[in-house]
């Protein structure tokens, strides 16, 4: 009997896990080589995994909505047809005992064997993380307060071990029995570094009326909801606004867009032109291109620009242009168009949405003149581009001022006030506007 183990493959840098969203083959089904076997989701991107062998699916180790780690065996295929079909069996993750020498609080030691209570939120915790929490006496309330670095903000083994080593799991609980914890005296602990946030305010409950329609959030909407809430909790947002004169850019694009389409086979929009100015400004103000880890600021070497893009479903996704500072305007245009097309056709890979350091969102697409965008964590800033409008404006000339018609656009710059002060945030968006207004109308592309 020959059996092939099908493992969850690596699907991009920093991707460590995936959620099983749909099995395309049932146990006992015959499957061809490279025929789709299972659909998985990594953060916001769905992937269809092909079979690595031809034969009969005899075992599945994960059910729908369960999370597998990269390298986990998710199924077994018999290649000679002689294997007995087995019932699907969820994988039991082997957990090694975590040394707790750094945790000396007596109240923790009293509840080491306490069973972990059921989560009251929609957060997912892997069996490994739950087992470590049980062994260390970490309550579910405390576990839910840990800011995770995994996909969708999930708490990873690394996160919980770092939490333990920091001495944070000093749970001030009253011992009820050797194996139980008093539910009435739970204390939420925020991780060291001050970047965790636990909101204990009870959420209001909306009661639908008899004529109201109830719509269940899909998986992506749940992820967006969780990440936006996390971003607002983690980062104190400040927004600065500047109005930029886009007249030179408007006239230049109108003049060259036909030639650009003919020569490059691409449509040039305003987005890559603004991105070019943003990249220049990031080079001038590199402390915008940073990330926060506890009490440390990580100054990022690469400039990777995320572009918020609407999907056919109405949800948003942020594909990333890697090393945007290495591209000229033509290269930037092709990168923008390629990612936008892949997003519209649900062809984005996990790698396409990883590694962003600064994000741009074009609210002008919807006719909005400005917005207050929410930071795409773990970045520290995001810029919204408003609609370009014809407006009357004062034009200064050597012969005096006069009123003329100009094309203007608002830039809205939201930034994390923990590490970006008003001076830096304001100067940055002003510099972007300067580069746009100083655009050379005689330049080539």
Image: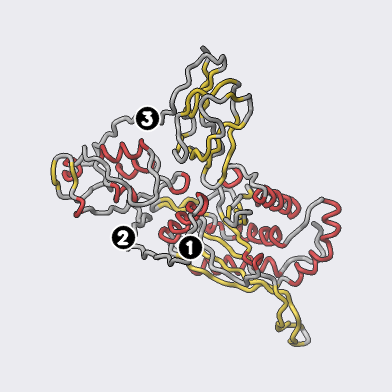
Residue 46 x %, y %:
57, 43
Other-residue count near label 2 (Cα within 10 Å), few / some / many at <14 / 14–19 / ≥20: few
- Residue 128: mark in rendering: none
Q: Which residue is nearer to you in this view: 103 or 350?
A: 350
Q: Residue at x 35, y 49 (%)?
A: 146
- The residue where tag 2 is placed is 200
Q: Is residue 387 visible?
A: yes
Q: Distance from label 3 to label 1 (Cα)?
A: 44 Å
State the SS at label 3. loop
Label whose residue precedes the other's in the sequence (2 or 1): 2
Foreground: disc 3 or disc 1: 3
Q: Distance from label 2 to label 1 (Cα)?
A: 28 Å
Residue 20 x %, y %:
49, 38
Q: Residue at x 74, y 86 (%)?
A: 403
- The residue where tag 1 is placed is 420
Whether 108 is drawn above or below 240: the answer is above
Number of disc labels: 3
Label whose residue precedes the other's in the sequence (2 or 3): 3
Give the residue furthest to the top: 1
Q: Residue at x 58, y 53 (%)?
A: 317
- The residue where tag 3 is placed is 92
Q: Quadrant of the C terminus?
A: bottom right
Whether 75 is drawn above or below 402: the answer is above
Q: Which residue is nearer to you in this view: 95 or 34?
A: 34
Foreground: disc 2 or disc 1: 2
Q: Is residue 14 visible?
A: no
């Amino acid at each position: 009997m020959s059996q092939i183990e099908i493992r969850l493959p690596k699907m991009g840098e920093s991707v460590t896990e995936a959620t099983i969203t749909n099995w395309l083959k049932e146990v006992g089904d015959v499957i061809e080589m490279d025929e789709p076997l299972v659909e998985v989701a990594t953060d916001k991107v769905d992937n269809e995994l092909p079979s690595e062998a031809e034969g009969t699916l005899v075992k599945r180790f994960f059910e729908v909505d369960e999370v597998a780690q990269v390298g986990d065996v998710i199924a077994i295929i018999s290649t000679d047809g002689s294997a007995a079909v087995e019932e699907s069996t969820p994988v039991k993750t082997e957990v090694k005992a975590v040394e707790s020498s750094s945790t000396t609080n007596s109240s923790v030691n009293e509840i080491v064997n306490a069973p972990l209570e059921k989560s009251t939120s929609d957060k997912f915790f892997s069996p490994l993380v739950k087992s470590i929490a049980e062994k260390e006496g970490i309550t579910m309330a405390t576990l839910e307060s840990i800011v995770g670095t995994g996909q969708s903000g999930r708490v990873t083994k690394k996160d919980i071990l770092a939490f333990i080593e920091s001495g944070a799991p000093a749970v001030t609980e009253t011992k009820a029995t050797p194996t139980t914890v008093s539910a009435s005296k739970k204390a939420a602990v925020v991780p060291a570094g001050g970047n965790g946030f636990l909101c204990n305010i009870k959420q209001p409950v909306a009661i639908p009326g008899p004529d109201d329609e109830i719509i269940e959030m899909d998986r992506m909407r749940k992820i967006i909801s969780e990440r936006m809430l996390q971003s607002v909790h983690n980062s104190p947002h400040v927004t600065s606004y500047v109005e930029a004169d886009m007249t030179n850019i408007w006239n230049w694009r109108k003049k060259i867009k036909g030639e650009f389409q003919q020569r490059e086979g691409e449509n040039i929009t305003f987005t890559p032109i603004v991105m070019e100015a943003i990249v220049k400004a990031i080079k001038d103000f590199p402390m915008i291109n940073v990330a926060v880890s506890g009490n440390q600021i990580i100054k990022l070497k690469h400039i990777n620009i995320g572009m918020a893009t609407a999907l056919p479903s109405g949800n948003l996704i942020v594909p990333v242009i890697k090393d945007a500072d290495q591209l000229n305007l033509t290269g930037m245009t092709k990168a923008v168009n390629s990612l936008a097309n892949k997003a519209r056709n649900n062809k984005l890979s996990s790698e396409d949405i990883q590694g962003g350091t600064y994000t741009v969102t074009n609210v002008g697409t919807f006719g909005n003149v400005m917005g207050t965008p929410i930071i795409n964590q773990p970045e520290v800033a995001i810029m919204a581009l408003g609609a370009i409008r014809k407006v009357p404006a004062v034009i200064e000339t050597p012969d005096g001022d006069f009123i003329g018609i100009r094309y203007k656009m608002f830039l809205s710059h939201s930034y994390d006030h923990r590490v970006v002060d008003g001076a830096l945030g304001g100067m940055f968006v002003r510099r972007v506007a300067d580069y746009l207004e100083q655009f050379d109308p005689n330049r080539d592309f």
